[in-house]
Image (cartoon, rainbow, N blue to C red):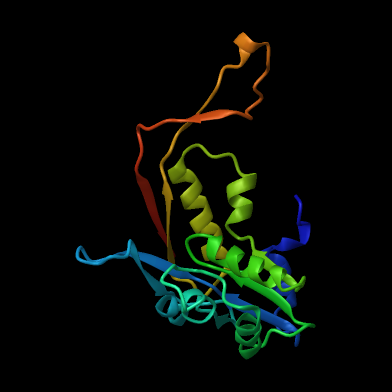
Amino acid sequence: MREPNALISTDALARELGHASLRVYDCTTYLQPAPAESDVPYVVVPGHDSFSAAHVPGADFLDLQGEFSDAATRLRFMMPPVAQLEAAFGRHGVGNDARVVLYSIGTMMWATRFWWMLTSLGFDGAAVLDALMRVFTMTYSYSAQDSLYRMGSAAIEAVPELENISIACPNKHYVPINLGPFGLDNSNRVFSATDEPHGQIECTVGR
């Protein structure tokens, strides 16, 4: 892994809870369908409600579109000027000596977005909570449903305050390409994406 310190396990986070320098942030954002008459493809909804319902002890919430994106453009999730970004992180207690842990519900992309923005500012003390990623990457998957259930169960186990979690993933298939006619061995490296079947698989895991 190129950035081995970019992930932190739930066990490691548990050991760090209570440290004065620790800053934990819920970065959850939801994308909802826009009304039929709208000229935008989706509506950005910050995860305030899910944060209020349950979050890691001591965590704060970061609103990606509302506070950490450029309001001068209609494009979503554009990084703001450096001074604005630094001021926003400062308001939430991020300093040069802080230890930052980021997480997001449903998908890691919101947490990894914040990790990337902090890294672009030269800050190297951030990590993304890997409660779901470790299950996704290190466990054999019998199906997409199996992976989602295992990931949801890991999140429930990692956060005692979490009553339930919903996860969705696209159901796409990739078929290994036969490189034998070219005298090459394809060891699960080159795949072709298929159009069918496709869809979205959703899973909700609760206590």
Q: Which residue reaches farthest right?
A: 97
User: Relative to residue 53, is residue 130 depicted above or below?
Assistant: above
Q: Which residue lies at the image location 39% right of the left edge and 54% below the top edge? A: 203
Q: Which residue reaches farthest front?
A: 72
Q: Which residue lies at the image location 78% right of the left edge and 83% below the top edge? A: 96
The quadrant where residue 199 appears: top left
**Which percent across, then down, holds residue 150?**
52, 51
> Between 46 and 130, which is closer to the camera in this rendering?
46
Which quadrant, please, contains the C terminus? bottom left
> Between 181 and 133, which is closer to the camera in this rendering?
181
Q: Is residue 38 left or right of residue 110?
A: left
The quadrant where residue 24 appears: bottom right
Q: Is residue 155 left or right of residue 8?
A: left
User: Relative to residue 76, is residue 146 depicted above or below?
Assistant: above
Q: Which residue reaches farthest bottom?
A: 91
User: Relative to residue 154, is residue 119 depicted above or below?
Assistant: below
Q: Which residue lies at the image location 69% right of the left edge and 84% below the top edge? A: 94
User: Relative to residue 172, is residue 22 depicted above or below?
Assistant: below
**Which percent across, then down, holds residue 66?**
46, 80
Q: In this view, does 200 lie to the left or right of 72?
A: left
> Between 80 and 32, which is closer to the camera in this rendering?
80
Q: In this view, does 133 lie to the left or right of 50?
A: right
Q: How many labels does the image show?
A: 0
